[in-house]
Image (cartoon, rainbow, N blue to C red):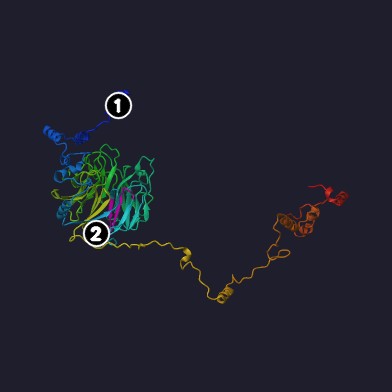
């Protein structure tokens, strides 16, 4: 039989098993590629495929060069769409905050007048900044509860903090400020008690907590809810102020921590309690200003805490947290940073309407700062951004015209805190990604960051590594090896001088014990018991005689009976011995009654 068909016809079946399936891999790959392209374009919302492109793709399905330019796989992130138009993507996607070297060089050319120094605080937001009046020490606080101290004179280019502590345990730090003398530091955190630390971080004072069950907050000794802000008096070094969610602004004296000094209670237009979110002293210390959650700004005379001296009802949008109030150096102008993305400047002499207003300044934080320049010509503030949606900026406004003069892109996170020190002429910035930056001018700035930039990093001491591992037994080292005796006679002379080695051991005790030593006995239990029985010399044969033996001594020298009762004590009458007792004594031991 020549073929399989002949064999199958003879044996009665059509073939040997099932026929193997054949696959067209080119068609499968083409179908998969088309599905991936359609899915990518559907996710991105771009359906720009024309009939000509589809026809051309079907004709040249085997061409591998065209497949490189098509979208295959998961969708491209949105931040890379602009880069795909200019350059071809090679390798893994770039990180979100990446900028090319050309973009960095452009920023450096724009900011050639200012230089910056970056201090890495932590991964959390830098929610508080403080600088002492001399400008020698910077302190930062964040959402990770840490307060870090930075000394410009002691730092090098590594920019490491010399001390880090958690003064308020598990409460985030909201405000840090040095007093006018710079010897103490006010720490305002998320709890109800503010703390005052010295320059080295040790506790000096802790404000008392009020009674939360009392309705009238003026009758409590302290705050009963979370603190929002605090600051020192610009003229009196012992006085500071705090505001809280309990609806009060309180002033404190450093010498009396048991009770507040005075209480200011902000009220709405209807007379209801409102929460102050920020507070500030005027430059002369005579006025106290508070920004509230209902959008009002209320100003009191420091010595009159009942009625407000200035009151603006609609300073900012109701329900937004006014994050900062700052008085100008001349004391006539007040700047307010609102949670409604605005920055306003006010003349306190005519407090009904703002002098100028800047909008579209995004603010996501309840502690975003604004401050005046030392010459009172500029006003600066920071802007907030969402994650991976741009860069936080430090914006400069002219005080007179309120036009944007300059802006600095700080980092790819929000700018929370800003501080312009009048003595150093340097700007400190705290960001939302844990960076504390210092901007300075090489010519106009003094000391501060310029002290540590010129210092090179200290070289770390590298430990010398062995090229080959050695196994050394302990007793092989000379320090563990016993010294070899050169002469036995010299060693014997030394041992003779040693009182412990030359002490003669005491011989064993023979007979009864003496000198505090007990006589030796056998090692068996029976010998031990026999020895103890032999040592028992107690005489209990006749208890009556044992008692009468002390009768004469007791009558002559009474010890237990005081002499005052000696005349009235009855005479003891003892029973006389009878014949029965004598007969009982003469009985043998085995007949006596056992007691």
Image location of residue 82, percent across then percent down: 16, 43
Of residues 536 and 198, the one drawn nearer to the viewer in this rendering: 536
Of residues 545 and 508, the one drawn nearer to the viewer in this rendering: 508
Q: Residue lying at the far front in this picture: please name it.
A: 1
Q: Is residue 398 left or right of residue 143?
A: left
Q: Which residues lie in the magenta part?
A: 128-145
Q: SS for tag 1?
A: helix
Q: SS for tag 2?
A: helix
Give the answer, above or below, for where 37 lies relative to 255: above
Give the answer, above or below, for where 538 lies relative to 24: below
Q: Dot 2 surroundings within 10 Å: few (below 14), some, or many (20 or more)?
A: many
How far apart marks 2 and 1 lie (CA) works out to 98 Å
Q: Which residue is mark 1?
A: 7
Q: Dot 1 surroundings within 10 Å: few (below 14), some, or many (20 or more)?
A: some
> Residue at image x 83%, y 50%?
589
Q: Is any atom of residue 352 visible in this view?
A: no
Corner quadrant of residue 86: top left
Image location of residue 473, percent across then percent down: 46, 63
Of residues 482 and 21, the one drawn nearer to the viewer in this rendering: 21
Mark linked to residue 449: 2
Q: Is residue 181 left or right of residue 502?
A: left
């Amino acid at each position: 039989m020549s073929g399989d068909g002949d064999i199958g016809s003879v044996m009665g079946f059509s073939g040997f098993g099932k026929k193997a399936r054949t696959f067209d891999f080119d068609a499968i790959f083409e179908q998969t590629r088309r599905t991936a392209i359609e899915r990518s374009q559907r996710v991105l919302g771009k359906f720009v495929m024309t009939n000509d492109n589809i026809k051309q793709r079907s004709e040249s399905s085997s061409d591998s060069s065209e497949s490189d330019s098509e979208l295959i796989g998961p969708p491209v992130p949105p931040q890379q769409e602009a880069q795909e138009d200019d350059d071809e993507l090679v390798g893994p996607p770039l990180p979100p905050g990446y900028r090319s070297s050309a973009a960095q060089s452009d920023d450096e050319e724009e900011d050639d007048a200012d230089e910056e120094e970056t201090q890495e605080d932590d991964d959390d937001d830098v929610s508080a900044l403080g600088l002492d009046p001399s400008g020698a020490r910077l302190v930062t606080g964040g959402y990770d509860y840490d307060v870090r101290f930075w000394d410009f004179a002691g730092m090098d280019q590594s920019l490491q903090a010399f001390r880090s502590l958690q003064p308020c345990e598990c409460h985030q730090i909201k405000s840090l400020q040095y007093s006018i003398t710079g010897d103490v530091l006010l720490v305002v955190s998320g709890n109800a008690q503010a703390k005052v630390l010295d320059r080295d971080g040790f506790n000096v004072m802790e404000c008392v907590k009020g009674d939360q069950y009392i309705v009238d907050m003026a009758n409590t000794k302290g705050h009963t809810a979370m603190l929002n802000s605090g600051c020192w008096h610009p003229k009196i070094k012992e006085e500071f102020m705090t505001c809280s969610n309990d609806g009060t602004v309180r002033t404190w004296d450093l010498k009396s921590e048991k009770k507040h000094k005075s209480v200011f209670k902000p009220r709405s237009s209807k007379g209801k309690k409102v929460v102050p979110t920020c507070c500030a002293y005027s430059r002369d210390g005579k006025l106290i200003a508070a920004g509230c959650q209902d959008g009002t700004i209320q100003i009191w005379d420091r010595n009159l805490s009942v009625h407000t001296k200035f009151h603006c009802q609609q300073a900012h949008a109701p329900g937004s947290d006014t994050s900062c109030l700052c008085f100008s150096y001349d004391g006539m102008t007040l700047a307010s940073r609102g949670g409604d993305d605005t920055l306003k400047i006010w003349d306190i002499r005519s407090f009904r309407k703002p002098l100028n207003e800047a909008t579209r300044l995004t603010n996501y934080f309840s502690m975003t700062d604004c401050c005046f320049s030392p010459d009172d010509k500029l006003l600066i503030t920071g802007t907030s951004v969402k994650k991976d949606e741009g860069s936080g900026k430090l914006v400069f406004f002219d005080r007179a015209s309120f036009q944007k003069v300059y802006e600095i892109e700080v980092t790819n996170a929000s700018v929370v805190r800003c501080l312009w020190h009048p003595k150093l002429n340097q700007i400190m910035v705290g960001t939302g990604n844990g960076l504390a930056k210092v901007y300075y001018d090489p010519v106009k700035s003094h000391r501060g960051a310029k002290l540590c930039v010129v210092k090179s990093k200290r070289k770390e001491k590298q430990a010398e590594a062995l090229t080959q591992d050695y196994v050394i037994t302990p007793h092989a080292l000379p320090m563990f090896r016993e010294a070899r005796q050169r002469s036995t006679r010299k060693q014997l002379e030394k041992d003779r001088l040693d009182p412990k080695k030359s002490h003669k051991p005491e011989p064993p005790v023979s007979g009864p014990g003496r000198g505090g030593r007990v006589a030796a006995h056998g090692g068996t239990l029976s010998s031990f018991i026999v020895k103890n029985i032999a040592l028992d010399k107690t005489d209990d044969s006749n208890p009556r005689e044992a008692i009468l033996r002390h009768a004469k001594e007791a009558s002559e020298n009474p010890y237990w009976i005081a002499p005052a009762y000696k005349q009235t004590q009855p005479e003891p009458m003892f029973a006389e011995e009878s014949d029965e007792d004598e007969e009982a004594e003469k009985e043998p031991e085995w007949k006596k009654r056992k007691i």
